[in-house]
Image: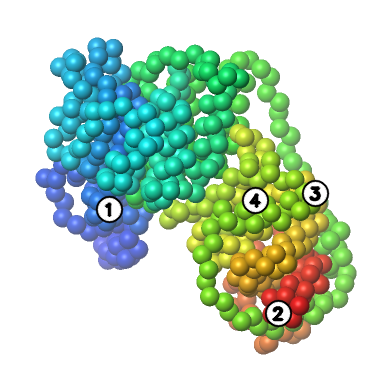
Amino acid sequence: MLFLNETEEKTNKIIDKLLDLGIILKDALTTEDKFFRLDRFINALPQKNYSEYTKKADNIKILILGIGTAGSYSIELLSKIGFNDFFIIDNDVVEKKNIISQNYDDNDIGMYKVNSIKKKYPECNIKTLNDKIPNYKALQPYLLSYKPDYLLSNADDSDLVIDILNNLFNDLPDIKVIETGYNITTTQSEYINKDNVDYFTDKFKHINASFRNSNGDFVGISDNSGIIFHAITCAFFSAKFIFDDVLEIADSNFGNFDFLKNKYFLDNMYYLPEFEDYVKRYNEDNTYLPVKSKKESSKKSGLNSNIKLFLAKKIDFSNFNFLRNLNLSSIAKMHITQKEIKMLIERYIATFYDCDSVLDRTLVYIPGNSYSNIRSYAEKVEKAGISTRIYLNGEREYIIPEYIHEMMHSIFFHISNDEYKHEKFVLGETLSFLVYLHETKSKYFRYLTYKTLKYIQGYYLDYFTVVSYEKYNLLNSKTRFYEEFPFSESKIDSSDFENKYICMTNNKENFYYLKYVVAVDDNIDKLKLLISKYRGNL
């Protein structure tokens, strides 16, 4: 094989490089293995390896609760992507009405569904239970003995679903739940783990309550109307969630297929608002409602007042020198969860502001896939039941202070639309929050303060240097920058600065980082107070 217009020697070098990067793999071509196509598919994905995938898949246990329309095709798909250990629970027998929508045929009529499915897949290790599960207590012994990695919950009992979610993670904290259901025109599936279980439990409770009267009696319209479309998409969502999780290629936690509108979503709920905007446009087009044209937002002309002030003033190195020379005694790593940090922030904010409604509708997304971007940010949404959403890169060293910072953003988005005032306010509240932990004698004070101070120190030195360079450059005084800036005494290597500057400012507006520098400058007294408390001087 030769690449277009390349010599054989150059082609071989390209192939060797692709092999070194793990983009392609070298192995003997054979079609004897029934998983030949799966092998080729996985190995075609960047930095993914079929043999590593199968090692994981061979040890995965999957419990399927309910094998009717929502669950009967699950093993069909899962067994064809390498999973073979299942525990299926259902107490129904196959009826004639099941044939067109579920994974059964005429020969199965009258058989228990669990026995029929086990008979269809003799190559799989399938445990069965022909019994009705009324509550979590009845399910608990089987969970504790089987210890599944995934629970596919296809139960049509909302009280049972809520009961399971309220208790399951106390017994099996690392299990993942895939909750799947449908209505007449839509299939929906949620991927639930210990980090998002509270969000989904509250969501299911709200839905459940909406179908009950003041006495708690069910008053909704109940009809099992699923057809083969519902069955196949339910199985697909379940299989794809598990496949993505084991292979670490995505962080999807919500699937939705609308058979009427032909709109399909399988991704993290973080991106649901954009999908709903897309669906809204479709609805407007198909119900003949006029679509308002969006005017192009005009680009900001000139420099804002904050930048003009920065350009007019002589550069003050005092805060830069203070943070450059700041030495903090290190502290042993502590384990603190996202949920615990959120609770501490709620307690602090509650001393002066009611923020429960905002925090309860704040969605945090920490991508765990190998293709995620290296950045963190918060943004106001007010769509799809979400008030704000926070994107955190889980690989970053300072994910804890970034989470605190972005949580403050989510609470105080209403304070000001001025980025400079907002950053000043958010940093000030972050520092006040840490002082609050000191005053309340929180065991997390020193650890959270150390991480936050190191975080502020690191970004301030970088950002101050970048905006100073931009100032000198704009004033045509780049030479003076290298003459006057204290490179030799700072933690920044002047020889590498140009490359670092290009990387940091790529696709950024001029003086993008100035708002963070100004926020630190305006909160320097609060920062010094916090440092004194950290060192035990106050």
Category of crowding for the residue at label 2, using alpha-carbon neighbours closer than 10 angstroms: few (below 14), some (14–19), many (at least 20):
few
- Residue named by callout 4: 378
Q: Please tell me which of labels 3 and 4 falls first in the chain.
A: 4
Disc on res. 56: 1
Residue at the image position 28 percent from the left and 12 percent from the top: 97
Residue at the image position 35 percent from the left and 57 percent from the top: 47
Q: Separation of disc 1 and disc 2 at Cα?
A: 49 Å
Disc on res. 536: 2
Determine the secondary structure under disc 4: strand
Residue at the image position 19 percent from the left and 16 percent from the top: 110
The amino acid on which the numbered mark 3 sits, given as a three-letter code, is Ile
Q: Separation of disc 3 and disc 2 at Cα?
A: 33 Å
Disc on res. 417: none
Location of residue 522 in the rendering, given as x and y in whole percent from the top left corner: 82, 67
Disc on res. 415: 3
Q: Separation of disc 3 and disc 4 at Cα?
A: 15 Å
The amino acid on which the numbered mark 4 sits, given as a three-letter code, is Ala
Please tell me whether mark 4 or mark 2 is closer to you in this view.
2
The amino acid on which the numbered mark 2 sits, given as a three-letter code, is Gly
Q: Quadrant of the C terminus?
A: bottom right
Q: Please tell me which of labels 3 and 2 falls first in the chain.
A: 3
Q: Quadrant of the N terminus?
A: bottom left
